[in-house]
Structure formats: structure tokens, C-alpha cells
Amino acid sequence: MSAAEEPAAQPGDPWAECTFEGAELATLCQAAAISFAEKIAWLEQAHQLALKFQEERRERGLPLIFPDGRIET
């Protein structure tokens, strides 16, 4: 069965989030369900986690690879 022939996920289907479309829909629904203040708090926590990962890589002597392609040793 090709991807075009696969049936669309039905609400309540436990496997619905296991497809690209299902995962995308679940992410959008979760984002719509939280407040703006919760989104800002999540972004701040994600930023702190990213900084912690950078710090740990520096401590281990590993290079930092940035999204723009820069590499910092």
C-alpha cells in the first residue's frame, strides 16, 4: 500500500500520531491548548537547556556546531 493509499488517521486511533500528518496535527493541537505565558516559559526552558548542552560540550572539548554552519572549537 503506498502512502497515497493509506487511510487517514481517525480520532481516537492510538496509532494516529505515528505518521507525519498525525504528529503534525498532535503538535498543533498541543500548541493551541497552552497559553502564551506557558509557551514563553517553555521557550525559556528550551533556551536554558541549549546553553547547558553548549557548556557540557565545551567542558568535554567537543566542537560546537551552529545551525548556520559555523563550528567553534
Image (tube, grey):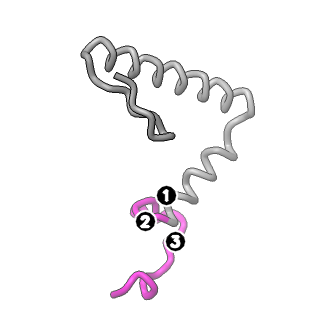
Q: Secondary structure at mark 3?
A: loop
Badge 2 amino acid:
Thr
x, y percentage for residue 51?
Answer: 47, 19
Sequence-first tag of 2 and 3 = 3
Quadrant in the rendering for residue 39 = top right
Q: Say which mark, if any, is on residue 60.
A: none
Q: Residue 19 — which label? A: 2
Q: Is residue 62 above or below residue 14?
A: above
Q: Nearer the viewer, mark 2 or mark 3?
A: 2
Q: Nearer the viewer, mark 3 or mark 1?
A: 1
Quadrant of the image occupied by residue 43 = top right
Q: Is the residue under label 1 in contact with that under label 2 (CB below 8 Å)?
A: yes
Measured as percent of width and height from the top left, residue 1 is found at 33, 87
Q: Residue at x 39, y 22 (%)?
A: 53
Q: CA distance from mark 2 to mark 1?
A: 6 Å
Q: Which mark is residue 23?
A: 1
Residue 10's disc number? 3
Region rendered in magenta? 1-20
Which callout, 3 or 1, points at the residue further toward the start of the chain?
Answer: 3
Q: Secondary structure at mark 2?
A: loop
Tell me the quadrant of the picture where the C terminus can be found.
top left
Please state if 68 lies on the left or on the right of 36 as rendered: left
Which of 6 and 2 lies nearest the eye of the viewer? Answer: 2
